[in-house]
């Protein structure tokens, strides 16, 4: 057995025979031409054909996966119709008297290098997009497409290896596809009846190819690099799209374990088919919004795959924890905007950084504390170091122009903390207005209720914000005076304690008195033994891990 570690970009398990896609040679001969105008006309005609193909591909994707996912190919069409792109190609033809194919390839490489050099991971992913659309134009120029197929399907590695929807495979066997790389248009054209999963040497979690794989429900792993070996063709493999693990020629123990996991996943999928699109509503008509918790932008795929109604807690501190230096405004905007766009109209509630206590970051230079759980953390850092806080708030506001984002403040103990935070938020809004940068002027603000002080002050806090979300992990810790990091206190730290449940009840009642909604985003939200209690207390929303969404919906609908 050979074990390879890549980057999991689309969750799921696939077990099957490997098919290695032979790379298509995109070498283009440079030719000197006598009539630059005629060559420019060739380019324009090929570009128009490519734009028409992308329109057809866009319509196909919209019909199968929805308008939201089809927008990618609108972007591809705009890329081809960009005056700068056309001007560069035509300028190269006119100046150097070169053939259109060579000019398109040269400009594609230039634009791709420009995108790849940018700080934004979203913009870096556009390097693959510009190569994709340019290859389409080159294929038209070179006659490498089926003129009978309106979407120009025979282009690229996947198509030429016979695995697209109108493909030419002679057998009915399904494969795990190994490739150097796959373009977004190739991924969208894959025949899911013939493809079990994808493994590529190149690519990233932010790429459109990865997003499409998630949409199509295909397990996918990128970034295996030099471990990509064409000799794997025909061998049996297991891939785990969640962990990024690939097992070529797996031993019997690995096969048995992954067959078991796959069976469990299929049982979960059966529940999804049964409950997908159904409201989270009791038999008596009590409606509860069911959201999911995430830590990274790539987790949004699991939220959608498990049919959550939104994201109730995006733990933004992981953008800080996984870096060795301060995340810039642009870096954060990129992350928040990516999630907002992927979620569409669904709410995305982002908790401002909750650093401190058990989440330490060296470059914050927080210093030693005898009792960090009661120390300098979360909103206390933000209010005393507003230069850090404002960078995050600006990024959140900018991202709010791209989706349904709300801001949630952690570790609140007083009304003054909320007012101070709102004042810094207003400063950030004012700056963005002055810079003519769009954002949602009416972005919602909420607080996490996770201290006894915030419960006692819930009536006053409710007058300041749009919603409450109860963080039951810390609320249990602070209510029962039990350090949740101390295993010897486990028998005393009972989250089912009447004291904790009464705190939850008081919070819900205060929220409703003031006309705002109240949810739970801590681990208790997924505790099915308490679901009946939360329903009786009138909870409005529960936010849980993505895999807990469907079992919880099932319990609520049968209540």
Image: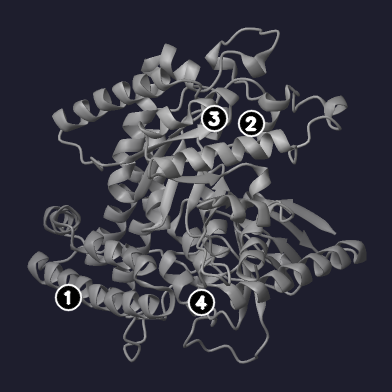
Residue indicated by mark 4: 190
Asked whether the viewer can see residue 116, the reply is no
Using the image, tell me which numbered label, if any, was put on residue 455: 3
Query: Which comes before the other along the chain, label 4 or label 1?
Result: 1
Q: Position of residue 42 (x, y in %)?
A: 17, 73
489 vs 391, nearest the viewer? 489
From mark 4 to mark 2, how far is it between C-alphas?
Answer: 48 Å
Q: Secondary structure at mark 4?
A: loop
Query: Which comes before the other along the chain, label 3 or label 2?
Result: 3
Q: Residues within 10 Å of mark 1 (few under 14, many from 20)?
A: some
Residue at left 53%, top 31%? 317
Residue indicated by mark 2: 475
Q: Quadrant of residue 50?
A: bottom left
Residue indicated by mark 1: 45
Q: Residues within 10 Å of mark 4 (few under 14, many from 20)?
A: many
Marks 1 & 2, CB-CB < 8 Å contact: no
Please indicate whether residue 253 sits to the left or right of residue 262 in the image: right
Say above or below: 388 vs 344: above
Marks 3 & 4, CB-CB < 8 Å contact: no
């Amino acid at each position: 057995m050979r074990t390879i570690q890549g980057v999991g970009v689309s969750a799921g398990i696939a077990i099957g025979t490997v098919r290695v896609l032979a790379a298509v040679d995109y070498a283009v001969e440079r030719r000197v031409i006598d009539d630059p105008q005629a060559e420019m006309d060739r380019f324009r005609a090929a570009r128009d054909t490519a734009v028409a193909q992308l329109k057809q591909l866009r319509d196909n994707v919209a019909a199968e996966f929805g308008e939201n996912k089809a927008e990618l190919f609108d972007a591809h069409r705009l890329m081809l119709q960009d005056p700068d792109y056309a001007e560069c190609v035509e300028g190269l033809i006119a100046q150097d008297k070169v053939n259109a194919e060579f000019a398109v390839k040269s400009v594609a490489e230039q634009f791709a290098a420009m995108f790849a050099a940018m700080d934004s991971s979203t913009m870096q992913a556009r390097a693959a997009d510009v190569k994709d659309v340019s290859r389409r134009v080159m294929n038209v120029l070179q006659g490498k497409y089926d003129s009978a197929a309106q979407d120009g399907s025979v282009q690229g590695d996947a198509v030429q290896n016979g695995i697209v929807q109108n493909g030419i495979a002679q057998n009915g066997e399904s494969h795990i596809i190994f490739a150097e790389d796959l373009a977004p248009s190739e991924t969208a054209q894959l025949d899911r009846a013939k493809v079990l999963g994808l493994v590529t040497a190149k690519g990233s979690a932010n790429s459109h190819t990865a997003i499409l794989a998630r949409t199509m429900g295909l397990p996918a792993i990128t970034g295996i690099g030099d471990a990509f070996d064409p000799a794997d063709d025909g061998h049996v493999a297991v891939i785990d799209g969640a962990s990024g693990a690939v097992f070529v020629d797996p031993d019997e123990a690995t096969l048995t374990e992954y067959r078991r996991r796959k069976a469990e996943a299929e049982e979960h999928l059966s529940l999804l088919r049964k409950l997908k699109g159904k409201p989270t509503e009791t038999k008596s008509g009590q409606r509860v919004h069911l959201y999911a918790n995430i830590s990274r932008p790539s987790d949004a795929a699991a939220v959608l795959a498990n049919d959550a109604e939104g994201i109730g807690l995006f733990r933004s501190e992981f953008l800080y924890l996984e870096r060795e230096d301060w995340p810039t405004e642009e870096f954060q905007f990129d992350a928040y905007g990516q999630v907002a766009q992927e979620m569409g109209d669904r709410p995305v509630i982002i908790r401002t950084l909750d650093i401190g206590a058990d989440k330490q970051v060296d470059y914050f230079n927080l210093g030693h504390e005898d009792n960090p759980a009661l120390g300098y953390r979360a909103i206390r850092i933000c209010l005393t170091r507003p230069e850090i806080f404002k960078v995050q708030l600006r990024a959140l506001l900018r991202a709010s122009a791209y989706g349904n984002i709300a801001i949630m403040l952690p570790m609140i103990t007083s009304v003054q903390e909320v007012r101070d935070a709102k004042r810094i938020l207003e400063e950030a809004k004012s700056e963005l207005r002055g810079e003519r940068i769009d954002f949602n002027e009416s972005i919602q603000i909420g607080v996490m209720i996770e201290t006894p002080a915030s419960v006692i002050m819930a009536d006053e806090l409710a007058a300041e914000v749009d919603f409450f979300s109860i963080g039951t992990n810390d609320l249990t810790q602070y209510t029962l005076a039990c350090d949740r990091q101390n295993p010897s206190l486990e028998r005393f730290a009972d989250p089912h304690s009447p004291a904790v449940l009464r705190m939850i009840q008081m919070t819900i009642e205060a929220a409703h008195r003031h006309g705002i909604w109240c949810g739970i985003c801590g681990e208790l939200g997924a505790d099915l033994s308490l679901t009946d209690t939360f329903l009786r207390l009138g909870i409005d929303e529960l936010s849980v891990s993505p895999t807990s969404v469907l079992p919880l919906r099932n319990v609520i609908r049968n209540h």
